[in-house]
Image: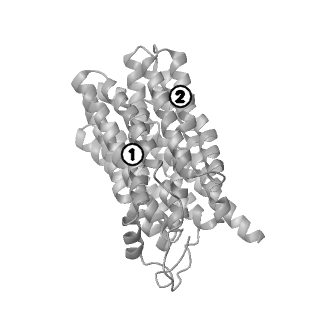
Amino acid sequence: MDALRRHTLLIIVLGGLVISLAMGLRHGFGLFLEPMSSELGWGREVFAFALALQNLVWGLTQPFSGALADRFGAARVVVAGGMLYALGLAMMGLSDSALGMSVSAGLLIGLGLSGTTFSVILGAVGRAVSPEKRSLAMGIVSAAGSFGQFVMLPGTLGLLEWLGWSAALLAMGALAALMVPLGGMLRDRPSPRQASDLSLRAALDEAAGHRGFWLLCLGFFVCGFQVVFIGVHLPGYLADNGIAVQVSSTVLALVGLFNIVGTYSAGWLGGHFSKPRLLTWLYLIRGAVITVFIAMPLSTASAYLFGIAMGLLWLSTVPLTNGIVASVFGVRHLSMLGGIVFLFHQLGSFMGVWLGGYFYDLHGDYDLVWKLAVLLSVMAAVLHAFIRETPVERSPAAGAEA
């Protein structure tokens, strides 16, 4: 038992470090929007499209990365993802064209994120932890991504001010390379195959016929739309209203800091209360926070308060959403099914970050996208009210695991 506990702890620690690096580096990208766009003569849509493509590639490849992790373990997938992530950052630092940005920040980093973030890592954690502790463990590892955001955002700003955007991105690429040895040590154990297990095709068919699975997917679309729009465009929104870039960095760091509390708390609450009900309230509160933020006069103080409030709600959806997938369908294909749900998150991310740039270039402000984010919160709250986390009933021939 001691060896088993040590193995579980190692999975949680290494997984947390990988997500901390991957998400910490990613959350600093919004700081590069204005300097790169200004120096290279781009409109904001060029940068926004590259990051939108990143989120789309991340989402489209996530089910495949998850399936590979379910089959062969997370270590190989994380190593490959870390290499692609580091290469993408290096090429992004050398980019001087829209095509270069799309290939580096879009394609390569999108592939890298697919192999180093939630679906792959949380799948490994879900397999290593007992069902009664699974939601809490997922909350702890998800919170590590927030810790990375809190720690690395000030560092990213410091690199940007000290080295300029190009050299700063090269330095970030060197940091991303640390995920390669960390991933190599992430020796999770895929669930042993049993005769009663569902095949990959049967698991896909089962999820496709489950109403709650599609409601969960649509709800996660909203989460992606909101958090990536805010993460990328908030610095520009604040700068347009006369708020210094240092304040923007602090706001995003506050999001990361308070998300540690929010995500851990969501994981703990998910082990004691209905996860769909918790998600309903989370989206309602998120919509209320955005409404108050855009309705109030903008100031440094209101920006800080917004960062704190959004931080408590930021990634709290992740352990709850993945926990529902595990509760309903079991852990045998958790990374793959979680990857499909995450695909919808990334489709929302694509729309949020791209529409933010598109409507800004069209109208000169973000007003329409802020209002759309509020309406989507209400929609997501309603969708989750109809989700049940009861394990699916399977015939003995089909296999049972929940």
Q: What residue type is labelled 1?
A: Ala
The answer to whether 202 appears left or right of 365 in the picture is right
Separation of marks 2 and 1 at Cα, in angstroms? 30 Å
Instruction: Provide the residue designation for mark 2.
Output: 307
Q: Tell me what residue is drawn at x 43 percent, y 58 percent.
A: 212
Q: In this view, does 335 lie above or below 36?
A: below
Q: Which residue lies furthest to the front in this view?
A: 386
On the question of residue 341 being in view, the answer is yes
Q: Is residue 257 above or below residue 292?
A: below
Instruction: Provide the residue designation for mark 1.
Output: 90
Q: Tell me what residue is drawn at x 53 percent, y 83 percent.
A: 194
On the question of residue 165 being in view, the answer is no
The answer to whether 380 appears left or right of 49 in the picture is right
Residue 209 falls in which quadrant of the image? bottom left
Q: Position of residue 196 (x, y in %)?
A: 51, 83
Residue 271 falls in which quadrant of the image? bottom right
Q: Tell me what residue is drawn at x 62 percent, y 66 percent.
A: 128
- Asked whether the residues under the numbered discs 2 and 1 touch, taking CB atoms below 8 Å apart as contact, a structural biologist would say no
Q: Is residue 395 above or below residue 304?
A: below
Label 1 secondary element: helix
Query: What is the crowding at mark 2: few (fewer than 14 residues within 10 Å), some, or many (at least 20)?
Result: many
Quadrant in which the N terminus appears: bottom right
